[in-house]
Structure formats: C-alpha cells, structure tokens
Image (cartoon, helix red, strand yellow):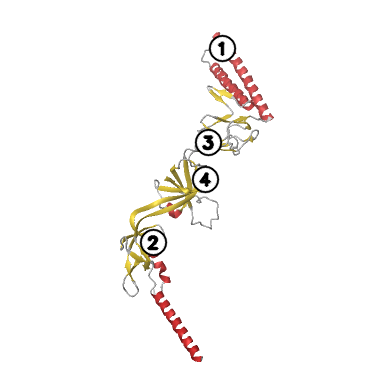
C-alpha cells in the first residue's frame, strides 16, 4: 500500500514538472508582435470649435421713439429688400407735443414779421427811396427765406411726432421700417404695443428684429495659439455639425484673426493664459442637398495644415528612440530575435508617422509598444 502511494506521488510530480517545462518553453518561444509597413496618407490638422452662422446679418432698430404698432413678418419668413417689417406708432409725451406746437407757432410769427418788414422795404424800393442793393432790403429777403425753411422744418417735426409720417422734398419720411436686405427673419424681440428706444436716444436702442441671408452660411470658431501660428487663408477644411455627426462638409479657410480674443478681456493681470483663442472663419461651405441648416448649429472644423499621400507609414508606437534618434526593430535570426535599424521620419498626425528612409512597403517590424509583454525582450 505504501509503495502504491509513493508511485502515485512520483507520477504526479513527473506530470506537473513536464507541464511546467512545456509551459515555460511555450512562453519562451512566444512570437514577436509584428507590424507590416504600409503605404498610406497622413494629414496634420488644426481643430477649431465654433458655430455655423450667416455671413451677412443685420439688426433692425428704429430711428424714432414710440410703440410697436404693427408687425408684418415673423420668425422664419423670407423677405425682400424694401419689404415693410414693423410700423412704429409715435407716442410723444404731452410736454414734447406742446413744445412742438409752440415752436411751430413761433416760426409762423417770425415768418409773418419778416414778410411785413420785407413788404415795407419793397415799397421804399418801388418809390426809389432806397436802391435794390440796400443792405436791409437784401437781409429782409434772406430772413423771409430762412423763416420759411424754419416753419417747414417745425411743421415736419410736428407731423413726425403726431403721426410718424412726413415729407422732405421728394423724400417721404415714414415710421414704417423696411428690410435693408433680402433674407430670413431670424428673431423677433418685440410685440405689438411694446415701447421702444430709438437710435437717436442716449440709451441703447431697442433691437426689434434681425435678418440674415441664409443662403450664404459660414463657420466662425477659434483655434489655439499653437495652431493659429500655422494657419493661412485658403487652407482646405472639413467640418462635422453637431446635429449631423455622420455628415462631413467641406469649406475653405477665409479668415484668421491677427489678435487673440482674450487680449482685451477683463481678467486678473497677474494671471496669464497660455491658451489664447484666435478666431477663424470658413466660407465656401458645401452642404449636402436636403440638409436643414439653422443659424447657431455647433460645429467642429478640421483645418488641413499639411498632407502627404502615397507614403510609407508605420504606427508611432512601433518606434524606439536611442537618444533623439528614432529606430525600428527588424526581426531576424539573432538570439533576441530582432535588430535595431535607424529610420528618418517625416509628417506625423500623432498616430501614424511617415518614414522617409530606412523601410520599404511590405517589410515587417516589431511593435515596440508590446515588447514589455515578451519575456527576456
């Protein structure tokens, strides 16, 4: 019985030892992680974050104070230049209206007085008591013309205060605001009966409406100062819009700011920001047909700084550096299973890198990033 237990123990030890030996042998012979050198394309890009907005938009404000009388167009409607948008109904204070009447009556009195003086001098001229070039006579004629003009101006002012309508020569003054451009109503900030402040006031004028040409949309965003240093007008741009993440649209970089957006911002002078944003604009955007575009859509733009096509590429993770010199590991029949060869690198996008010399398409190299998983590597 005892011999049987001894024999069983020896057999178990032999089996475990053999298993351990073969397991360790398999681990020692673990194949190297290899990568095949390929031909590809590498782009170096700058990223800008911003919005899609109209290239041309205007704010509608009134030149006269009053209250909103009528609104002819609302948000989303398309209008042509010259189309009536909003009618302003004057709402003068009693003091202002009284002052306008008083100024009109004063002008009428001055005109009558100047006419009477001119009539007296005309009789003296007719009776040859004074010559036609007499100074008082010439001045009296000028006074009549001046008082006529002043009376007309006071009458026009009163008409505008009371009704918002008047005429100056061949021009007709009106309180109806018309569209300065053809476009779409983006927003409407007032309602009928709401008082407004005019552009002539010392206060900020009321923005009643905004119009924009939605057929000409651009991208406005900002890039970091590191990317801004490499940008120039005319670079190609690809964009993705937040509502359509799977749709890619293209455009052209049309503007790069020469001054940081944060340069004049109010901040603690003792705290300096090293991430200053520079505004960029992209135009000539080609939207796919049927894509609904609204002003203010968030978008991300990738601006192509450099592009290399049909080049030898490898993943950057496969590189090993000897000091500042890059090298790759080439599999061979040596004891470690590889040798280190120097390479000359070109353009990189942070994931893949161009190999200018040292490798050819189809060659295999060892993935250096995986060497830590190989025993005795």
Depicted 204 relative to depicted 315: above or below: above
How far is disc 3 from disc 1 in space, using C-alphas?
62 Å
Comparing labels 1 and 2, the label whose residue is closer to the camera:
2
- Mark 2: few/some/many CA within 10 Å (<14, 14-19, 20+): some
The answer to which of marks 3 and 4 sits earlier in the sequence is 3
Residue appearing at x 57%, y 13% in the figure: 121
Image quadrant of residue 125? top right
User: Which residue in the structure is indicated by mark 2?
Assistant: 315
Label 3: element kind: strand
- Mark 3: few/some/many CA within 10 Å (<14, 14-19, 20+): many
The answer to which of marks 1 and 2 sits earlier in the sequence is 1
User: Which residue in the structure is indicated by mark 4?
Assistant: 297
How far is disc 2 from disc 4 in space, using C-alphas?
35 Å
Where is residue 91 shown, x and y percent of the image?
Answer: 65, 30
Comparing labels 1 and 4, the label whose residue is closer to the camera:
4
How far is disc 1 from disc 2 in space, using C-alphas?
104 Å
Label 4: element kind: strand
Numbered label attached to residue 122: 1
Q: Relative to residue 133, is residue 326 drawn left or right? A: left
Q: Where is the C terminus found, in terms of image quarters?
A: bottom left
The answer to which of marks 3 and 2 sits earlier in the sequence is 3
Label 1: element kind: helix
Where is residue 222 shown, x and y percent of the image?
Answer: 48, 50
């Amino acid at each position: 019985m005892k011999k049987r237990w001894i024999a069983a123990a020896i057999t178990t030890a032999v089996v475990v030892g053999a298993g351990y030996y073969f397991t360790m042998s398999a681990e020692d012979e673990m194949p190297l992680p290899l990568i095949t050198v390929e031909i590809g394309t590498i782009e170096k890009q700058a990223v800008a974050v911003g919005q899609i907005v109209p290239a041309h938009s205007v704010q509608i404000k009134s030149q006269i104070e009053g209250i909103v009388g009528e609104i002819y167009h609302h948000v989303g409607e398309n209008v042509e230049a010259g189309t009536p948008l909003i009618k302003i109904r004057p709402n003068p204070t009693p003091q202002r209206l009284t002052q306008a009447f008083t100024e009109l009556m004063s002008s009428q009195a001055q005109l009558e007085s100047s006419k009477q003086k001119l009539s007296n001098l005309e009789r003296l001229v007719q009776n040859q008591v004074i010559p036609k070039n007499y100074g008082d006579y010439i001045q009296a004629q000028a006074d009549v013309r001046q008082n006529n003009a002043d009376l007309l101006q006071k009458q026009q002012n009163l008409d505008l205060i009371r009704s918002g309508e008047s005429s100056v020569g061949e021009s007709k003054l009106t309180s109806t605001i018309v569209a300065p451009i053809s476009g779409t109503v983006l927003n409407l900030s007032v309602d009928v009966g709401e008082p407004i402040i005019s552009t002539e006031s010392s206060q900020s004028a009321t923005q009643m409406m905004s119009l924009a040409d939605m057929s000409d949309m651009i991208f406005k965003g900002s890039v970091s100062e590191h990317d801004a240093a490499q940008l120039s007008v005319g670079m190609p741009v690809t964009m993705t819009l937040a509502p359509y993440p799977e749709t890619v649209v293209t455009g052209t970089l049309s503007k790069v700011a020469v001054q940081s957006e944060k340069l004049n911002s109010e901040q603690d002078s003792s705290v300096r920001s090293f991430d200053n944003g520079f505004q960029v604009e992209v135009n000539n955007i080609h939207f796919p047909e049927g894509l609904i575009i609204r002003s203010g859509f968030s978008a991300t733009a990738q601006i192509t700084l450099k592009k290399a096509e049909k080049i030898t590429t490898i993943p950057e993770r496969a590189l090993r550096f000897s000091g500042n010199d890059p090298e790759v590991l080439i599999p061979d029949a040596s004891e470690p299973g590889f040798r280190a060869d120097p390479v000359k690198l070109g353009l990189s996008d942070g994931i893949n890198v161009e190999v200018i010399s040292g490798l050819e398409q189809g060659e295999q190299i060892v993935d250096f990033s995986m060497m830590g998983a190989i025993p005795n590597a």
